[in-house]
Structures are given as C-alpha cells and as structure tokens.
Amino acid sequence: MASSTILASVLAAFLLIMLWLGGANIDALQAAFCFVGALVVVTSGELLLRLAGLGASPVRVHLAVVCGATATSLAILAGVLVAGFRAGPVFLGWTVIVAAAVIATRHRISWRGRANDFMDCAVVAALAVLVAFWCRHAAAAIPELKATGVLPVWIDYYIHGATIAQFGSSLAAGRGAIDLVGQPLVIYHYGGFMIAAAIGGFTDLPGLGLACAVLLPVGLLLAALGSYALAATLAGPLAGVIAIAFLALLPDASFYGLGNGFFGFHWLLFTAPGSGYALGAAAVALVSANEWLRNRNRRALALAVALVAAVFQLRAIFLPILLPAFTMMLACETAIVRRHARVFVWLAFGAGALVLVLLPTVSPLRHFWFEHSAVERFLEIVHQRSEPTAYGGLYARHIAGVGKATTVALGTVLLLPVALGGFVVLYPIALIAWIRRAQWQSIDLFPPLLLATFLAVVVLAPMAPNWHIDEYQHRPFVLVYQIIAIWTAVYLCRLVFDQSVAANYARALFALVVVSAASILVGLLSGLQPAQPIFAWGKNYFRIPITAGELEAAEFVRRQARPGDVAAVAPVDPTASLQDRAIEFVGLTDMPSYLARPAIQTLLGGRHRRAALDRLAIMGKLAAETDATTAFALMRQSGITWYVQIGGEGPRFDPNRSLAAYAISNATVYRVEPGKPAG
C-alpha cells in the first residue's frame, strides 16, 4: 500500500497546484481533503483491478487512477441523482463504501505491490507535471478574468462551471436545472463533472474556477495515463512514452498539411474538457479487453464492458463510434467468426461497397440520404467555413464543377488527412510492416474498425437533437486520433526496438522525462496556447471579455448569497442559446438562475419550454414596470431573490438606483426580501 500512498500524494499535489493557480485559498483542510480524495480514487481503482484479475498488470498504477476516477465519478453521480445530496457529502459516503470493501475483501485478494510500482508513480508524476504546465493558463482563468476582464478559455466554460455548481454548491444542489431553477435536469453526460463538484464543496472557487482548474486538468491527466497504459500494455513502457510524444509533443494535424484548425486535436481537448475522461476510460477498457482476448479472463471482460458503458456518462457522444467498433472487435473472437473469417471479411467489404455505390447513384436513396443526414452541412463547415486552411477554395470549386455526391465523397476522404495529419500515412506503413513480420491479433482490429465507424457516422448521422450539425461527426474525432497515435507508437516500438529495450522501465522513465521537458520547452519558447483556436470563427468564442460591472456584481452576490436564493439577470436576450449574461452569472456565483439561455430552454420543449416562455414574459413585465412596489411584489411572487441589471442605467422601476443593495457604473443589484420593497 506504500505505492498507493505515494501515488495519492502525487495526485493531491497536482490538484492543489491547479487550485492554487485557480486562485483558491489553500489551507490544511483542503490539502487533507485532496489527499484523502486521491487515496480513495486510487484505492477504489486498485480494488476494481484486483477483483478483475488485473492486479499483476505491468501498468496497474496507471490503470488504478483511471478506473478509480471513473468509478468515483459514477458513484457520486448516482448519489446526487438518486438522493439529491451534494457531491461532497456523497463522496464522503463513497469513501466509507471503499474502506468497507477493502476490509471485506482483504482475505480474498492480494494487495502485494510490484517492484516497478515506485517507478510507475514517477511516470504519473512526470505526466502530471506535463499536464499542469499546459493547463496553467486555463487553470488561472478566474485570476486573469479579475485582472483583465477577459476569460482565457472557450466561452462554454461558463456552462461547465454552472453544471459543476449544479451538483456541488450548497446554493444549487437539489434544485433542478441551475439555468432554469426548479425545472428537471436534462439528460446529459454529467459523470465527468463529479470530481470537480466534490472538490467544490471544500474550496472557495465558483463553478467557473473549478471547471478551469479541476475539470480540465484532471481529464487531461486521465487521458494521458490511459494512453500510456494502453501503449505500454501492447508493446512495453517505451511504447507508452512514444505515444505520449505523439500526443503531447508532436503538433496535431491542424498545424501542418491541410491545416484545418477545426480538427485541432489539442484545441478540442481543451475546448471540450469532458473528452479526457472518456479517452482515459476507453483506453483502459481496451487494456482490459486485451487481457480477455489473451487469457480469456471473464472478469477483465466485465470491467472492459463496464468502462465502455461508463463512457455514456463521461462523453456520450463517443459511443456511436466506440461501441460498434468495440463490439465488432470482440465479435471477431467468437467461434463462428473465427471459423468463417474470410466470409465475414468479404461480406463486410461487399456491404460497404454496395452502400457506397447505391447511395450516390440511386436517386431515391440519394435524396433520402441528403434529406436525413447532416453530411452536406457538416462537410461545408469543415471545408468551407473553417478558414484559414491550406486548401482554401478546393471544396467550393468541386461543388461548382462536379455533382453533389462526388463532392461529398471527396469531402469525406479529405477528412482523413484533415483529422489525422501525418498518421494517415505513418499508421498504415507501420501496420503493414508489422503484419509482414508477425501475426495479426484481434486487438489490432480496433483502430481500423473505429476509423470505419467514424466515417460511417460522418456520412450517415443526422443532426443532433440540440441542432448542432457537428455534434456526432466532429466531437468524437479526438478518440480516433488518440487510438491511431497509440497504435502507431506500438507498431513503431515493436519494429525498431527489441523486447528487452521496450520493456526497460528505467530507460522508459528517462525517455518520458525527456519528452515532457521537450514539450514544456516548446511551450515556453513558442508561447503556444492549445486552447486557442486558429480558425476564424472560433475566435468569436475564445478570450471573450466579460461585460463591465458583471464580475463585481457577481462577487457581491456570491458573498451575500444564501441557500434558496435565485438570481434574475436583465436585460434578457430571448434568442440566446449558447451564452448570455445569466449563464455567466451562474458560473461566477453558483447561484441558480431564474432564466438563462432562453432559446435552448424553448428548444428542449415540454416543461422547459413552458417555463421559459412564462419567465420571459415576467422578465418583460419587470423591464417595463415603472413602480418599484409592483416590481418587487412580482419578484417575490416569482421566487426571485436577486435582480441584477447590467448596464449604466437603473431599471425603469428605480432609475436613480436608490433602492439597490449594490451599484457600480455598469451594474445594479437588488436584494428582494420577503415583505420588503428593496434590499
């Protein structure tokens, strides 16, 4: 257990550094909570691995962190959804469960460590330093926002912060949707937010700060650990180092070749911070699946299936490509497929070829395809609206010169070099070279199957329910990039190094330190910020200034807020779907909002639509009301505790702002107490 204590210390130090960068006031209680929390995560992961028969895995330490974080996240989520408790108290309950499970199983499983455990802890430390360096600007978002008035991350982080507060803050937990207080939660992948929400109960950071200082770096660390573990399992620790070099040192495809920034691997990891949690879980699922494929360990298979299922609550959008590829890989090990492998291969190729021929050539099928899939609009976003690229105008010229179906085929094929860059050449070469030297293994089927399912989703998937054209087609590409990079590293390691070199832990650790130092040096010399988009329209959503006065108003309300309070922010933009001042206010205060992002609420339909329309009408009445007594009566009747007016002038019911609880040049705050006209 000594290695678990050291590992927990490494993880706790990582969290404390991130929180310190985020502006949290670190004290002994927070440090103790981070250590205990890290120890619970590691111990729960160790327990799962040993119960699954993976306790002797050469990468057990790395697997334990990812498995433990995944199990902890889902356990907390179950507690907050079923019991309605805050994430912090649920985590304390999970701590008791883990401790009881360890005691109950102490005679059934061995907790003996391995000789290389301490070296593996050093690997985790090196990866933690690497992640902390690249996340330093994002983690410090709150201090930079206060200093400059600019948020140094993608604007969605206000929404991520609101989601964290929804489960972790005493102001918001158990009160339904935080952006439309009192209404039911929508179906969403909440799992990745739970660790940040649990930590939120023990820090003074608002949800926005936790999203930047915990949600993002923890996810990236899990992705790095899972990637290293998968590559090391398949070809030794040196392959894990090569995989990390490909993912953290090598520029992604957006920086060379066709240069399409919309498919920037690093940019999307920073923009969609939940991705890292799913990448880590998927990689460890493949490690467990490999154990079943090699030794028929059914417990390992059960763990693999559970981790794939967990992706639904970590990053659900990955499942349309992950689940079919994973299922087909396992199916290839069944007796019927192995006996008739050639027949199934030809059937798969034949079916694919038939679809590719019939869809563009048969008029009714072609019409049905274009009408019910988002492929045309998605490829237009990728190839025409993500400028600047190195192939600007190519797609438009083909649209003008050839038929629609031919242009779609070209655009789909172009996605391979756009998304994978050099790996579109390096991976096939390494694959063919390895196949010529050794026998094909079932686990090697996963990358091409994943790539095939990704292209199938691009071609066939409809528009997402939230009307995002690129939801199914774009967001999962980071999983494809990660897997192709890992397998390329595996094949190259096998081809170039003999087994004794690839399995040398000391050399691998030294190589990882060199790779991490080189990545950090590149970052220092270049000033590169992975979160910054390089395509034109992305700049409208990155480093966006906050409205003058809003931050000060939010800080005042956060200091004065009590459980049960509700904030209404005016003026309201009825067309706001992605972002508005109300959701920004939620991310900064953890305060449930009377109405935020009205357009997305009406799009959800049902109760959300009716509530949003009713509240829009009430906010309209408040904006038009000239009598303060009537206005405050309406607020009390509607359950509004804080009314925040953004702008240089006071509301019509108090133009001189004499009734305000707080006022500065561009914001006015009213506290609505029962039975009183003003704060």
Image: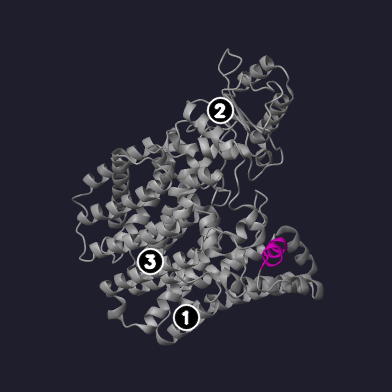
The image quarter containing residue 379 is bottom right
From the image, tell me which residue sits under label 3. 228
- Is residue 384 shown in magenta? yes
366 to 318, vertically: above or below: below
In this orientation, which residue lies closer to the viewer: 394 or 673? 673
Disc 3, disc 1: CB below 8 Å? no
From the image, tell me which residue sits under label 2. 566
- Disc 2 marks which amino acid? Val
> Residue 76: which disc?
none
- Disc 3 marks which amino acid? Tyr
Nearer the observer: mark 3 or 1; the answer is: 3
450 to 221, vertically: above or below: below
Q: Secondary structure at mark 3?
A: helix
492 to 678, vertically: above or below: below
Q: Residue at x 52, y 38 (%)?
A: 588
Separation of marks 3 and 1 at Cα, in angstroms: 19 Å
Q: Residue at x 48, y 84 (%)?
A: 432
579 to 109, vertically: above or below: above
